[in-house]
Image (spheres, grey):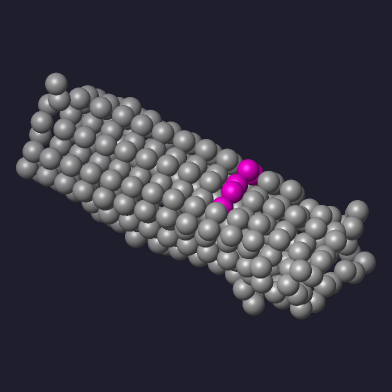
Amino acid sequence: MMKLVKDLYVDGERPFYCERDLRLERVVIGPGESSLKEGGNIEAVECEFKGKYPFWECDGFTVRDSIFREGARAALWYSRGCRMYDTLVEAPKMFRRISDVVLERVRFTNAAETFWDCDNIRLKDVEAARADYIFMHCHDVEVDHLRLLGNYSFQYARNVVIRDSELDTKDAFWEAENVTVYDSRITGEYLGWYSKNLRLVRCRIGGTQPLCYAENLILEDCTLDDDADLAFEYSSVEATLRSPVPSIKNPRTGHISAPSVGDIILDSNIKSPGDCEIKLN
């Protein structure tokens, strides 16, 4: 049976340290540190978090209809089994080295350095603003309807599936591996450099020099914006494009099919085998 705490204000150091089987309702966690550290099987409903590090080393917790204020930075680290629904997060650096995470209808207003070294992540209907370096070194990630504004996203990530999302993000998917993106809009410079097994399906892509230095790159029925120039440099690529391509530069190998190409640049710097076939469809 869960212990119920409701309509309470607490602050200071570790007010609920090592608590298990605990339900908080309309509780305000004021300034202080580690309010729920080392706990487990915790539910927080309509709560407000203002202090640092509330959910560290926790094993199983659910947060609903709550708010993490800016002072609750670095709130969820080194834990397992997080569920979060209908919650506003104003603090940066959330979610580090945490596994088994489900978020639905969560909005981050400052998602800088959020989701580092995490695994087994499921997101649906999530918004993340000011999200520089989000999802770094994460693996086994599934995303549905993510609205992301922030640079350097998904760097070094592995085993990622993204659907029906809007990603406004420079330097996305650098050195990422086994990433598939469906029916999404991706805007930002230098997309997917040094990636392995990046697959884009029915996506719209904008930003200069996309998809260079990539290995086993696949594009299926994608469109490129007018600023997506100098694409595919030194990449091995299989691409079927539905729009004209502003320019292609020195693809390493593979096949590219497009309605038209503005410029095809094949110069002395092309890398072996240098046999990519470019076909107008």
- Vertical position of residue 49 compared to residue 278: above or below: above
- Residue reaching furthest to the left: 7
Does residue 145 appear left or right of residue 26 in this picture?
right
Image quadrant in which you'd find residue 70: bottom left
Relative to 238, is 140 above or below?
A: above
Q: Position of residue 35 (x, y in %)?
A: 23, 36
How many marks can you see?
0
Residue 178 magenta: yes
Image quadrant in which you'd find residue 112? bottom left
Quarter placement of the C terminus? bottom right
Q: Who's the residue at 69% across and 46% down the image?
A: 196
Residue at 10% x, 31% y is 4
As drawn, the residue found furthest toward the top would be 1
> Which secondary structure class fits the magenta region best?
strand
Question: x, y (%) of residue 200?
Answer: 62, 55
Q: Quadrant of residue 108?
A: bottom left
Magenta-colored span? 177-181
Q: Does residue 191 belong to the magenta stretch?
A: no
Query: Residue 260: x, y in percent?
Result: 75, 75
Residue 24 versus residue 31 in the image, above or below: above
Q: Is residue 228 or residue 113 the one in the foreground?
A: 228
Res 134 seen here: yes
Quadrant showing the N terminus: top left
Residue 91 in view: no
Q: Residue furthest front?
A: 281
> Is residue 6 toward the left or the right of residue 271 in the image?
left
Question: Residue 71, position in %: x, y?
Answer: 28, 52
Seen from the viewer's position, the closer of residues 173 and 184 is 184
Q: Residue at x 23, y 31 (%)?
A: 42
